[in-house]
Image: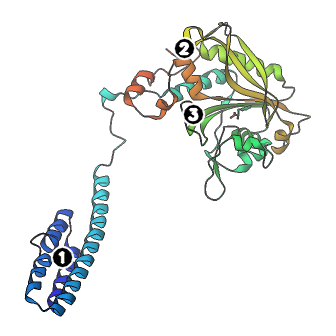
Amino acid sequence: MSDIETLKAQSLQAVKDAATLPELEEVRVAFLGKKGRLTEIMKTLGTMSVEERKSFGAAVNLAKDELTQTIDARKAELEGFALDARLKQEKVDVTLPTRTRHEGRIHPVTQVIEEAVAIFGEMGFSVAEGPDIEDDYHNFEALNFPADHPARAMHDTFYLKGGKLLRTHTSPVQVRAMKKQKPPLRVLAPGSTFRCDSDMTHTPMFHQIEGLVIEKNIHMGHLKGCLIEFVKTFFEIDDLPVRFRASFFPFTEPSAEMDIGCSREGGTLKLGNGGDWLEILGCGMVHPNVLKACGLDPEEHQGFAFGMGVERLAMLKYGMPDLRAFFDNDIRWLTHYGFGALDIPSLIGGLSQ
Ligand code: PHE
């Protein structure tokens, strides 16, 4: 009986001493393998009385179970160490110079944002940013989404522990801009947005460009002039037809969606004067409730706002067929659809070479 206790203690100590996975495997074979010491000791059962055999057999089995469990635990621990060591060793030094074979390309999302910044920059807009992790107040409440309003559900919001959320649109930057700067205001806010939605045409993360103008005596005519100028310049089509359709957003009144002309003949989409229409962005006059929430007097200041999807603009201008490929990080896609790092979009130099 004491034999088996000694053997057990020895085996557990050996597991502790095993510093590597191969060493641990040696210990397992030495004690539990076909010719292992705990396997061998079972062979002495034949020399024992029935009573002895029972208790001895049970003790050996217990020892085997305990050893197996201890080995498994140690194995998990050593695997953890091995992974840590590997992660340390395989650290990537991002400051190393690039390999020319994989010369970096500018992602179409970045390119489209740069192009929009170039166009609106020319009109006097400056770029503003807000956090990706927002609170309910900036993402919804100050934007005139009443509590329990169905429009909140429409946004498929990702909520974080503690009540914060991932912004569902770039419109909260409107609120931050109005609270930070005194009018007149011309702000362009590009950035990431998040909605719990994923299929052919939706990814959980995507990008929007928000625009906001606050001045005295601003009206719908300014909004239309500004956006018509933008789409013609962005798509590089001088006679691009546009139309505004009445729509609804809680934070604008009146609200509209802007369509641009296209043709879908033979199943291929072509932008321009083709008799058909394609929705391109949402816009409207800033709702008086939003102005008030941001400390502005609607009798004194008015404004317009617009928001558009960056990936959608990119797909329409550059012809990518599948939205999901934007975020696959496939070097072939990036090489094909990416842009040269030195071809910086400008109205004088050209938006897209
Ligand atoms: N935030 C709206 C959306 O995500 C777009 C929008 C912005 C509409 C500004 C009007 C004014 O759908």
Residue 224 visible to the viewer: yes
Distance between mark 1 and mark 2 Cα atoms: 72 Å
Q: Earlier in the sequence, mark 3 or mark 1?
A: 1
Residue ID at (76%, 19%)? 244
Name the residue carrying label 3: 202
Return the residue nearer the eye: 138 or 184: 138
The quarter of the displayed image where residue 66 is located: bottom left
Query: Residue 75 appears at what percent x and percent y?
Result: 27, 66
Structural crowding at the residue carrying mark 2, measured as other residues with C-alpha within 10 Å and reported as few (<14), some (14–19) or many (≥20): few
In the drawing, does residue 347 fall left or right of residue 249? left
Between the residue at mark 3 and the residue at mark 1, the CA separation in whole angstroms equals 55 Å
Label 2: which residue?
Answer: 350
User: For the point 56% across and 30% down, which residue is it?
Assistant: 201
Q: Which amino acid does label 3 sit on?
A: His
Residue type, label 2:
Gly
> Closer to the camera: disc 2 or disc 3?
3
- Amino acid type, callout 1: Ala
Name which residue lies at 23% across and 75% down.
16
* Mark 2 or 3, nearer chain start: 3
Q: Mark 1 points at which residue?
A: 14
Q: Find residue 112 and report its image quarter.
A: top right
